Image: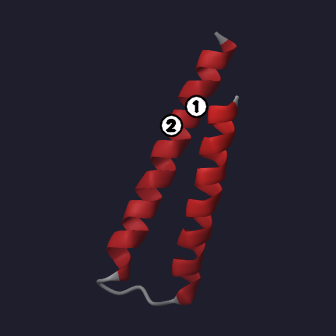
């Protein structure tokens, strides 16, 4: 359960950073790679959360 909470907190922090970058309006060639990396990170964390939930159910 502790791992799941860590993943959730990490996802929340990354989402906050992503939202800041998106709202800032400075989508340029320097910001776009960070936005893409953050979006990929959120997707990976979502996948890990699902894996942990499946393990806990089993």
- Placement of the N terminus among the 4 image quadrants: top right
Depth check: 20 or 25 in front?
20
Q: Residue 50, labelled with which disc? A: 1
Whether 28 is drawn above or below 10: the answer is below
Query: Judging from the image, what secondary structure is the residue with disc 2 in?
Result: helix
Whether 2 is drawn above or below 43: the answer is above
Q: Residue furthest left?
A: 29
Tell whether 5 sits left or right of 46.
right
Gap in angstroms between the C-alphas marked 2 and 1: 5 Å
Whether 52 is drawn above or below 55: the answer is below
Q: Residue 13, labelled with which disc? A: none
Tell whether 24 sits left or right of 36.
right
Tell whether 1 sits left or right of 29.
right
Q: Is there CB contact under 8 Å for labels 2 and 1?
A: yes
Q: How far from the left and from the top, in percent, is residue 38?
A: 45, 62
Q: How far from the left and from the top, in percent, is residue 47?
A: 50, 37
Which residue, given by chain and number where applicable, does mark 2 sit on?
47
Q: Residues within 10 Å of mark 2 (few under 14, many from 20)?
A: few
Task: Name the residue rendered at 51%, 79% in the picture.
Answer: 21
Q: Residue furthest top?
A: 58
Query: Judging from the image, what secondary structure is the residue with disc 1 in?
Result: helix
Task: Name the residue rendered at 54%, 26% in the picture.
Answer: 51
Whether 4 is drawn above or below 8: the answer is above
Tell whether 22 sits left or right of 40.
right
Q: How far from the left and from the top, in percent, is residue 30?
A: 31, 83
Task: Name the residue rendered at 38%, 71% in the picture.
Answer: 34
In the rendered view, how is the structure colored? secondary structure
Q: Residues within 10 Å of mark 1 (few under 14, many from 20)?
A: few
Residue 35: name its quadrant. bottom left
Task: Name the residue rendered at 51%, 89% in the picture.
Answer: 25
């Amino acid at each position: 359960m502790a791992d799941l909470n860590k993943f959730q907190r990490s996802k929340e922090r990354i989402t906050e950073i992503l939202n800041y970058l998106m709202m800032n309006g400075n989508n340029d060639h320097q910001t776009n790679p960070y936005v893409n990396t953050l979006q990929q990170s959120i997707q990976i964390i979502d996948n890990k959360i699902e894996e942990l939930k499946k393990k806990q159910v089993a």
